[in-house]
Image: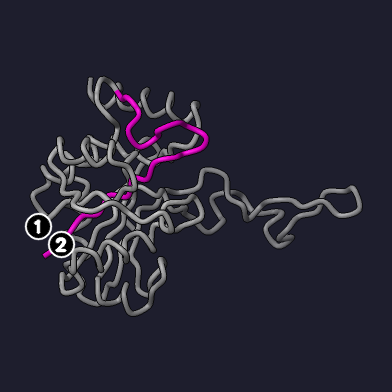
Amino acid sequence: MTICVIPARSGSKRIKNKNIINFFGKPIISYSIRAAIYSGIFSKVIVSTDSKKIQKIAIKYGAECSFLRSKKLSNDKVSVKEVLIDTIKKVKSNETEYHCLLLATAPLIKAQDLIKAHKAIRLNKKTNALICVSEMENSPLRSFFVKKKYLKFKWEENQKKNSQELQKLFYDTGSFYFFKTKELLREKKFFLDRSIPFYLGKEKSIDLNTAEDLKILKYFYKQNTK
């Protein structure tokens, strides 16, 4: 059994109402809800929000949203880990084997992505979590810092290496995560021991924070729906 939780608080600062912004005629959160529902892998798709408006939208598109999140867990300093654990406690799903955390602003994530990731974490019983990652285009292993006005290599041993000789590094795309519930509740941290990667291309790894991010997101969405 697996439950999907979509955090969607109100009050985003850089993009107003980011989680329900109009995205090709529909609230952006509706794409995440539909992808989760269409995947068929979740016993429940739950939206955690502090907003009655978002609550109504979530229910309209098929998600469960039976409670409003407390103000204490609705500011921009609260981690999504805390929101997920709070939801597990509220709906009493601590005995559910896995939980998925899916961003409300991930319209490029399809049902098939969720199905593949779900299969990957279930295939290896020793795995505690799955994190979506994308490869860094410019490796920080050849980065500089400034010392007494002059540039210095942070890692001098990499100065003469070609980019293909450097270790591949990845970043967390923030698109979605799968957690083994008992380990999440036991460790109470986001990066669990024995977490495996789920690789996403750049076009599915856009974190929506600015107006420019939204333009890029819309561009790739158009490309993917042609």
Few, some or many residues within 10 Å of mark 1 (<14, 14–19, 20+): few
Which contiguous range is marked in magenta? 1-23
Q: Which residue is mark 1?
A: 43
Asked if residue 22 lies left or right of residue 123, the reply is right
Residue 213, how many percent across, how many down?
Answer: 46, 31
Residue furthest right as drawn: 148
Identify the residue at the far bottom of this view.
Answer: 186
Where, by quadrant of the figure, is residue 19 drawn? Answer: top left
Residue 223 seen in the current view: yes
Three-letter code, disc 1:
Ser
Marks 1,2: beta carbons within 8 A: yes
Q: Nearer the viewer, residue 111 or 18?
A: 18
Q: Quadrant of residue 96?
A: bottom left
Q: Is residue 67 left or right of residue 162?
A: left
- Quarter of the picture containing the C terminus is top left
Q: Magenta includes 165?
A: no
Q: Which residue is mark 2?
A: 2
Dot 2 falls on a residue whose secondary structure is strand
Q: Mark 2 is on which residue type?
A: Thr
Q: Is residue 171 left or right of residue 107?
A: right
Q: Give the residue at x 22% y 35%.
A: 57
Which class describes the residues within 10 Å of circle 2: few (<14), some (14-19), or many (20+)?
Answer: many
